[in-house]
Image (tube, grey):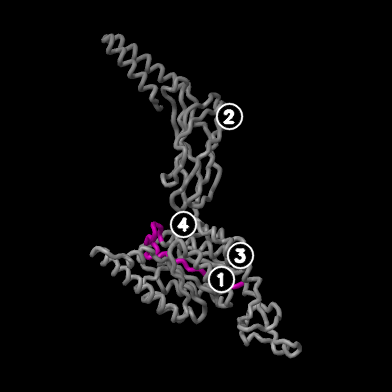
């Protein structure tokens, strides 16, 4: 049984009457009347126990967007249900409305809609649906909670999707160009054309030139059906926030853009997320399903506050990618972590694969390095300059060992990584 605000108002009115007349019989009569009305309301309220509650609606919502989940009430009793319904969700889902007035006729059905605006990634299980059935006077009623299992997975946002049309246009332009670079075994021959200044002399087709007046060169189509293995570092450095966003989330956005672009280009994309263990793995997904599979796998990832195991990363890459491919590692250019972790493993990885390291640069470091004025600003500038020089040094070390390095602020990392992929594809270096 539940009491409403109306019951409290009735009690206050009864108390005023008793205080005005100040007799014991009046007190007994007032209490008896209020109690009788409350009991009658409870008895006449529609029962909650026979109600059948089910859910339907969205099972996946992208972070930053909204979704809807419907709650359906079936009232098999012979009384109309009038009251309120509360659909229970975790606070971070921002479920609206919190409580909904409802009226379900006897033997009827009612559907209520809850709008979810999640504030973080992951799986969210719905709580119980609480139904409050009130009597005709709305002084009191019955209340019960009904289970209605439902889970919504909140996917990582794909803010860099806006860059996809531009990158696809660049890909189509690349695909339509006649490249005169000799790409070696595995390149797809396209056609012959006349030699122009600047063409690689190794691409000259001497047999065809002998039959023609002009020198002819071979042209090649951009390589397709290449394999790209994306390695997402979920160790402690990925937990740091840059411009208010965790590095891991920015890296995920870059992964989504690269996956969408590479799958459209006809390349195969695999993903592993690693720290001290493999947290997620998408291997062998079809080109039409890989973007959805990667998005779904990254939804549950969180940064682990421990150092990533470089040996595990290296061995996992070598176990999955047995043939030469492009390995894209999204991590932080932390000098200590790179020198102790990645650098010793580069010779083994580079001997079998093309390596690309992408990292989120903090624009605050450049701001600190440019600061001048008070003593505190000068100290900040010195710290910023040192951090920037250390980052540049470790990038130079990686490049000398044949690693392609992409180091860009959060708003430019996805686009810069996609451009690096297109450049490697154009040069036939995948």
The quadrant in which the N terminus is found is top left
Q: Identify the mark nearer the N-term, 4 or 3.
A: 3
Instruction: Tell me the CA gap for discs 4 and 2.
Output: 39 Å
Q: Identify the mark nearer the N-term, 1 or 2.
A: 2
Q: Which mark is residue 169?
A: 3
> From this viewpoint, which residue is outermost toward the front?
373
Instruction: Tell me the CA gap for discs 4 and 3.
Output: 32 Å
The quadrant in which the C terminus is found is bottom right
Image location (x, y in percent) of residue 99: 45, 34
Front tag of 1 and 2? 1
- Badge 4 is on which residue? 300
State whether residue 393 is above or below residue 365.
Answer: below
Q: Identify the mark nearer the N-term, 3 or 1.
A: 3
Of the pair 30 and 169, the residue shown nearer to us? 169
* Residue under the point 36% across and 18% down: 10
Disc 4 and disc 3 in contact, CB within 8 angstroms: no
Dot 1 lies on which element? helix
Disc 1 and disc 4 in contact, CB within 8 angstroms: no
Image location (x, y in percent) of residue 94: 44, 44
Q: Which mark is residue 422?
A: 1
State whether residue 82 is above or below residue 189.
Answer: above
Q: Identify the mark nearer the N-term, 4 or 2.
A: 2
Instruction: Tell me the CA gap for discs 3 and 2.
Output: 55 Å
User: Callout 1: few (<14), some (14-19), or many (20+) C-alpha neighbours within 10 Å?
Assistant: many
Image location (x, y in percent) of residue 126: 47, 44
Residue numbers of the magenta segment: 225-246
Dot 2 lies on which element? loop
Q: Which mark is residue 108?
A: 2
Quadrant of the image occupied by residue 368:
bottom left
């Amino acid at each position: 049984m539940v009491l409403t605000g109306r019951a409290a108002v009735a009690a206050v009115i009864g108390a005023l009457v008793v205080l005005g007349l100040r007799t014991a019989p009046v007190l007994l009569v007032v209490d008896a009347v209020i109690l009788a009305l409350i009991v009658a309301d409870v008895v006449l309220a529609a029962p909650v126990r026979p109600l059948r509650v089910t859910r339907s609606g969205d099972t996946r919502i992208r972070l930053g967007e909204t979704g809807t989940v419907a709650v359906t009430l079936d009232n098999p009793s012979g009384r109309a249900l009038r009251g309120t319904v509360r659909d229970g969700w975790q606070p971070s889902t921002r479920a609206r409305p919190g409580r909904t007035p409802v009226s379900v006729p006897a033997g009827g059905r009612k559907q209520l809609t809850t709008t979810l605006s999640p504030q973080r990634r992951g799986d969210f299980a719905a709580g119980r649906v609480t139904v409050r059935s009130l009597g005709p006077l709305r002084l009191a009623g019955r209340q019960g909670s009904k289970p209605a299992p439902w889970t919504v997975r909140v996917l990582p946002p794909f803010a860099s999707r806006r860059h996809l049309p531009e990158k696809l246009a660049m890909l189509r332009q690349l695909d339509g160009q006649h490249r005169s670079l000799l790409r070696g075994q595995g390149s797809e021959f396209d056609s012959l054309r006349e030699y122009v200044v600047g063409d690689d002399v190794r691409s000259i087709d001497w047999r065809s030139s002998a039959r023609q007046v002009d020198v002819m060169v071979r042209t090649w189509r951009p390589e397709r059906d290449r394999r790209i293995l994306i390695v997402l570092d979920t160790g402690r450095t990925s937990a740091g926030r840059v411009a208010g966003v965790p590095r891991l989330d920015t890296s995920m956005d870059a992964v989504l853009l690269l996956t969408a672009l590479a799958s459209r280009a006809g390349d195969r994309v695999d993903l592993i997320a690693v720290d001290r263990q493999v947290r997620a793995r998408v291997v062998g997904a079809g080109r039409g399903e890989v973007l959805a599979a990667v998005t779904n796998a990254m939804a549950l990832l969180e940064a682990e506050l421990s150092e990533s195991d470089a040996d595990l990363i290296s061995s996992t890459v070598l176990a999955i990618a047995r043939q030469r491919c492009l390995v894209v590692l999204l991590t932080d250019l932390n000098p200590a972590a790179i020198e102790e972790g990645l650098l010793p493993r580069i010779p083994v990885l580079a001997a079998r694969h093309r390596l690309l390291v992408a990292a989120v640069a903090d624009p605050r470091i450049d701001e600190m390095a440019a600061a001048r004025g008070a003593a505190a600003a000068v100290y900040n500038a010195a710290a910023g300059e040192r951090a920037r020089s250390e980052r540049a040094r470790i990038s130079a070390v990686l490049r000398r060992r044949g690693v392609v390095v992409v180091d860009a602020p959060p708003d430019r990392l996805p686009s810069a990584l996609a451009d690096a992929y297109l450049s490697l594809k154009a040069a036939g270096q995948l």
